[in-house]
Image (cartoon, rainbow, N blue to C red):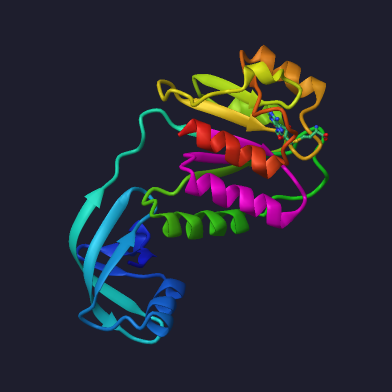
């Protein structure tokens, strides 16, 4: 069943009004009409069931008939990835983090990242689309940082890990227990610098292996995200 994005500020008592782009898609592509049942999420944990009460070209209103709330997780997972310039790869990595259940997504400019700028608006768009597609009623948050240092200063996770291809394969990580909030770091295509590795150690971080092969950054993100959930 299709799920639509209905931000909290578009809900007025029992009536919800979809944002214009969502309304257009619902009406013109998916052919929703008055009286149809509809499901929405607000991105902050709210799920709504309703019935379409008005369907115009770019406007869809619904009468909310049921609401449930998904509580935030107790031990959130943050995944920070080093910036890579290839937009498609970066967006792919972000999309997979959403699907695999990462709670907070960060991109940092690593010492070995190529120059470039993170388009926060694009990332928010990818996160919204992937959240809807994968049925996440609570969208992950997104932040970008100028350095790993800035990311670590802003992090309040209880545990820190970093994937590093130079770590012995014997330290290949099994699944993590979700007993603490956790931040995980994956380097950019050029890898983590020695300085960044030292910084992680200074912050009581653990370096882990994802196996004997050198993975692309986006593959490492997926491999790690699977272990985290
Ligand atoms: N420094 C390497 C490649 C970096 S791969 C080079 O340029 O040759 C990009 C990132 O993916 C790394 O910083 C690391 O975080 C992660 N990664 C890739 N393969 C890995 C492995 N086998 N174990 C742990 N992390 C890995």
Of all residues shown, which one is farthest toward the left? Answer: 65
Location of residue 80 with respect to 173 vertically, above or below: below
* Residue 34 image-quadrant placement: bottom left
> What residue is drawn where x is 80% and y is 21%?
195
Q: Position of residue 153 (x, y in %)?
A: 62, 25
> What residue is drawn where x is 67% and y is 44%?
218
Location of residue 34 with respect to 171 vertically, above or below: below
* Residue 208 image-quadrant placement: top right
Location of residue 226 with respect to 163 vertically, above or below: below
Q: Position of residue 188 (x, y in %)?
A: 74, 38
Q: Is residue 156 magenta?
A: no
Q: Position of residue 171 (x, y in %)?
A: 63, 17
Which stretch appears magenta? 78-105
- Quadrant where the N terminus sits is bottom left
* Residue 15 image-quadrant placement: bottom left
Q: Is residue 92 magenta?
A: yes
Residue 127 falls left or right of residue 139: right
- The quadrant of the picture showing ligand 1 is top right
**Of the pair 81 and 42, the residue shown nearer to us:** 81
> What residue is drawn where x is 70% and y is 40%?
217
Q: How many numbered marks appear?
A: 0
**Of the pair 16 and 161, the residue shown nearer to us:** 161
Residue 135 falls left or right of residue 145: left
Q: Position of residue 13 (x, y in %)?
A: 21, 62
- Quadrant where the C terminus sits is top left
> What residue is drawn where x is 21% and y is 55%?
67
């Amino acid at each position: 069943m299709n799920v639509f994005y209905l931000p909290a500020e578009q809900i007025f008592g029992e009536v919800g009004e979809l944002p214009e782009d969502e309304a257009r898609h619902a009406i013109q592509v998916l052919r929703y009409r008055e009286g149809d049942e509809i499901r929405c999420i607000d991105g902050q944990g709210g799920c709504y069931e309703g019935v379409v009460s008005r369907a115009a070209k770019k406007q869809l209103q619904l009468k909310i008939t049921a609401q449930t709330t998904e509580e935030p997780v107790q031990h959130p997972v943050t995944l920070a990835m080093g910036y890579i310039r290839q937009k498609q790869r970066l967006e792919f990595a972000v999309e997979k983090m959403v699907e695999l259940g990462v709670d907070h997504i960060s991109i940092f400019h690593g010492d070995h990242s190529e120059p470039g700028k993170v388009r926060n608006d694009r990332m928010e768009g990818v996160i919204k689309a992937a959240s809807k597609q994968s049925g996440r009623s609570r969208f992950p948050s997104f932040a970008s940082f100028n350095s790993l240092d800035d990311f670590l200063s802003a992090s309040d996770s209880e545990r820190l890990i970093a994937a590093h291809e130079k770590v012995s394969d014997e330290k290949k990580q099994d699944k993590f227990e979700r007993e603490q909030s956790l931040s995980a770091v994956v380097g950019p295509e050029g890898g983590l610098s020695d300085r960044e590795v030292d910084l992680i150690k200074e912050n009581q971080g653990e370096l882990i292996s994802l196996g004997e092969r050198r993975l692309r950054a986006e593959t490492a993100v997926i491999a790690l995200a699977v272990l985290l959930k």
